[in-house]
């Protein structure tokens, strides 16, 4: 008999060491490191332990080994710490599209055929134009149900009708939703049917948000251990969201009152985290 663990939604499942190793692998831990941490962790597990507790224990072990790996492992939590407003998440999503060669605007008003819409991200590349709605949740158990893509599809069709008059019909117009949690099965089924692009924490497959961020090196500054909660908030209020932006704008650390010694630690950790 294996150990039963409790997921964030209350579901009870058997503990699977391979799932733990996969999560560690996603953070960049090699096979030996995965095996070592799993071996250290398993004797500490008990019946009814939460997946949250397992995550915390694994993170603590990983941090002893490498701040870089620990920062990548806690990516999901770091994104949730970007709240409470949705702006930092919109900023992150916009940067991800920019990396793919799109010209991006965030938080803009777009005139549709019938009404005006506030759009989180507008991205254009060549003959492709996309409007993206960003759904940020600070609660991991929250899902985007089918009402979300239904609503976004109706907004997209209104904007598309106006864009076709302005830019013509030879351009590929698309709509999409990006969330840091998950979509319901009905939501993904509807989106696939109408051609709406969906991206969630673990959907679609290798193009899911967690892989998209990790491959891009656009890790949120909330991943950094060297920053305390207040300092993270001060940087977010300055419009800084990514570790990469801290590295590119080093003077911001002194601007918010961070002493030189700590600033060096922050920059070293940030540079290590965004390394490919």
Image: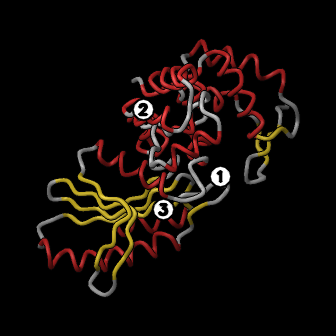
Residue 255 vertical position relative to residue 201 in the rendered view, above or below: above
Left or right: where 25 falls relative to 60: left
Quadrant occupied by the C terminus: top left
Q: Position of residue 150 (x, y in %)?
A: 46, 74
**Which is nearer the eye, 27 or 256?**
256
Q: Pointer 3: what residue? A: 188
Residue 268 vertical position relative to residue 151 in the rendered view, above or below: above
- Give the residue drawn at x 51%, y 59%: 86
- Give the residue drawn at x 57%, y 23%: 262
Left or right: where 249 falls relative to 256: left
**Which is nearer the eye, 65 or 46?**
65
For disc 1, the neighbor class at 10 Å (few under 14, some 14 to 19, many from 20) is some
How far apart marks 1 and 2 lie (CA) works out to 34 Å
- Outermost residue, bottom side: 114
Labels 3 and 2: the sequence-earlier one: 3
Mark 3, secondary structure of its residue: helix
- Give the residue drawn at x 54%, y 28%: 27
Q: Pointer 2: what residue? A: 251
Q: Position of residue 181 (x, y in %)?
A: 57, 53
For disc 2, the neighbor class at 10 Å (few under 14, some 14 to 19, many from 20) is few
Nearer the observer: mark 3 or 2; the answer is 2
Q: What is the number of the mark on residue 106? A: none
Labels 1 and 3: the sequence-earlier one: 1
Q: Pointer 1: what residue? A: 140
């Amino acid at each position: 008999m294996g150990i039963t663990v409790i997921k964030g939604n209350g579901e009870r499942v058997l503990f699977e060491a391979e799932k733990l190793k996969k999560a560690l692998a996603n953070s960049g831990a090699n096979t030996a490191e995965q095996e070592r941490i799993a071996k250290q962790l398993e004797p500490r597990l008990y019946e009814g332990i939460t997946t949250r507790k397992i995550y915390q224990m694994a993170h603590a072990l990983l941090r002893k080994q490498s701040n870089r790996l620990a920062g990548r492992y806690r990516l999901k939590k770091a994104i949730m710490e970007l709240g409470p407003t949705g702006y930092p998440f919109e900023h992150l999503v916009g940067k991800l599209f920019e990396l793919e060669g799109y010209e991006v605007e965030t938080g803009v008003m777009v005139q549709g055929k019938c009404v005006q819409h506030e759009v989180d991200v507008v991205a254009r590349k060549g003959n492709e134009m996309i409007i993206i709605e960003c759904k940020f949740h600070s609660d991991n158990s929250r899902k985007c149900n089918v009402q979300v893509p239904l609503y976004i599809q109706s907004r997209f069709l209104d904007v598309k009708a106006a864009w076709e008059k302005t830019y013509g019909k030879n351009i590929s117009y698309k709509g999409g939703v990006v969330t840091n949690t998950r979509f319901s099965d009905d939501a993904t089924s509807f989106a696939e049917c109408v051609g709406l692009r969906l991206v969630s924490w673990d959907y679609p497959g290798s193009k899911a948000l967690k892989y998209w961020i990790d491959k891009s090196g656009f890790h949120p500054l909330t991943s950094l251990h060297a920053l305390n909660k207040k300092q993270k908030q001060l940087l977010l209020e300055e419009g800084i969201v990514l570790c990469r932006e801290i590295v590119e704008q080093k003077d911001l650390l002194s601007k918010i009152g961070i002493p030189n010694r700590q600033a060096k630690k922050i920059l070293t950790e940030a540079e290590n985290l965004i390394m490919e």
